[in-house]
Amino acid sequence: MKTITVNLPYITEEILIGRNLLADHHLQAITAAYDQVVIVADERLQQLQPRLLETAGQVFYLDASTAKSPKNHARLVDALIERRASRKSCLVAIGGGNLGDLVGYAAATYMRGIDFIQIPTTLMSMADAVIGKVAIDYREHKNLLGAFASPRYVLCDTALLDNLPARQRAEGLVEIWKHALLRHDARAVAQIDTILDNNLEGDYEELIRFSLEVKKQYVEADHTDTMGAHAALSLGHTLSNVLEKRAGLSHGAGVLSGIMHAAILAQELDMISRVHLNNILATGRKIGRYLPEVQLAQAQLDPEATVAALEYDKINHNGLVQLVLMTKTAPGYQKVALSRAELLSSLTKYQDNPMVLPSLQ
Ligand SMILES: NC(=O)c1ccc[n+]([C@@H]2O[C@H](COP(=O)([O-])OP(=O)(O)OC[C@H]3O[C@@H](n4cnc5c(N)ncnc54)[C@H](O)[C@@H]3O)[C@@H](O)[C@H]2O)c1
């Protein structure tokens, strides 16, 4: 078992990573001190992981695909009020990133903040969605209402990945790959390529640890996203936010598109070499085999409408849209402010780039 401690001004977060962690009664031990424990789980896990939930006590089940809504936030707060939950109570999220974000936001807002615990069940949530920020969507805006908040404990049981569908594994690999690109970590990129060449079989535990260690460093350095370091984590995410809401892409598919667009733009601006770009696109194409809708979204992208939506993004600054791009030297990323014309041109080049994904056959 591996442990990671994230030291934040408002909480010390402890993350345990290992196989069959949940069978070892860790959840009972870490929840013993709370006056009430309210468990919220992805409803699909009732069929997929019945044993995980049978000892969990009373559980609220939610549909992960629509979890991050103001309506569900209100439902959770109502449940906490009904149970007279106090500041000594805690919420537990059992599910992927959607469930975790909703439960984390409910915990961050109830009585100005109570503890929450995450049991991530997807690779995306294990490798990324358990440190630093929580949010829900509002109208057509992704992650518009949110908080800087972290769970008190995370139990990452890698046995839960055994039956995770291939596309969900590929989505998680996208965020791990983002961390490897930011760190210029050739070893991690090679491990990801090996897993992709091996039909998604391989050592995920090591990659999850790597990914969380990288994320921890950015969040510890800049936990409220004000000093600049945290922005690195937005690589690929600004365009993704728009594609998720407008083109219906999942988070992993959106970030994959965003990273490939960022790489093409970074090479144009001479921030990375052509060889580096080709390496990035080669790995992106391999991940894209499992997320074919990325190619459809690329073909159907409407650059004008996409720019208009990007201009609403919270990263919009003084009339310019800021995108995080990768660089050839440390620190591995740079925030670049782009005019409307530059953005339009970059999206058209992304759309026309035949390297992005092979044709669907
Ligand atoms: N807060 C953060 O720092 C952060 C970071 C990354 C992503 N996110 C958020 O996470 C969300 C995406 O997370 P996700 O990809 O986990 O999506 P998700 O929670 O919707 O889960 C994806 C699918 O996998 C299913 N599933 C969950 N566990 C399973 C299991 N063990 N076996 C089989 N199927 C399982 C779910 O029912 C769902 O259909 C996005 O909303 C994104 O914004 C947040």
Image: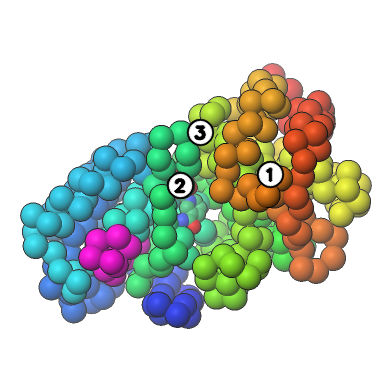
- Up-down relation of residue 264 to residue 32 (above or below): above
Amino acid beneath label 2:
Leu
Q: Which residue is mark 3?
A: 245
Element under label 1?
A: loop
257 vs 76, nearest the viewer: 76
Q: Indicate the position of residue 33 as horizontal and vertical percent values.
A: 18, 79
Residue ID at (66%, 50%) = 317
Amino acid beneath label 1:
Gly
341 vs 160, nearest the viewer: 341
The mark lying in front, picked from 3 and 2, is: 2
Count of number-bearing discs: 3
The image quadrant that residue 222 belongs to is: bottom right
Task: Give the magenta range.
Answer: 107-118
> Does 201 sit left or right of 352 as displayed?
left
Residue 206 in view: no
Element under label 2?
A: strand
Q: Which residue is mark 1?
A: 319
Distance from the alpha carbon under mark 3 to that under mark 1: 22 Å
> Does 41 sit left or right of 349 as displayed?
left
- Asked whether the beta carbons under mark 3 and mark 2 sit within 8 Å of each other, the answer is no
Q: CB at mark 2 closer than 8 A to ligand 1?
A: no
The quadrant of the rendering that contains the N terminus is bottom left
Residue 30 is marked as none
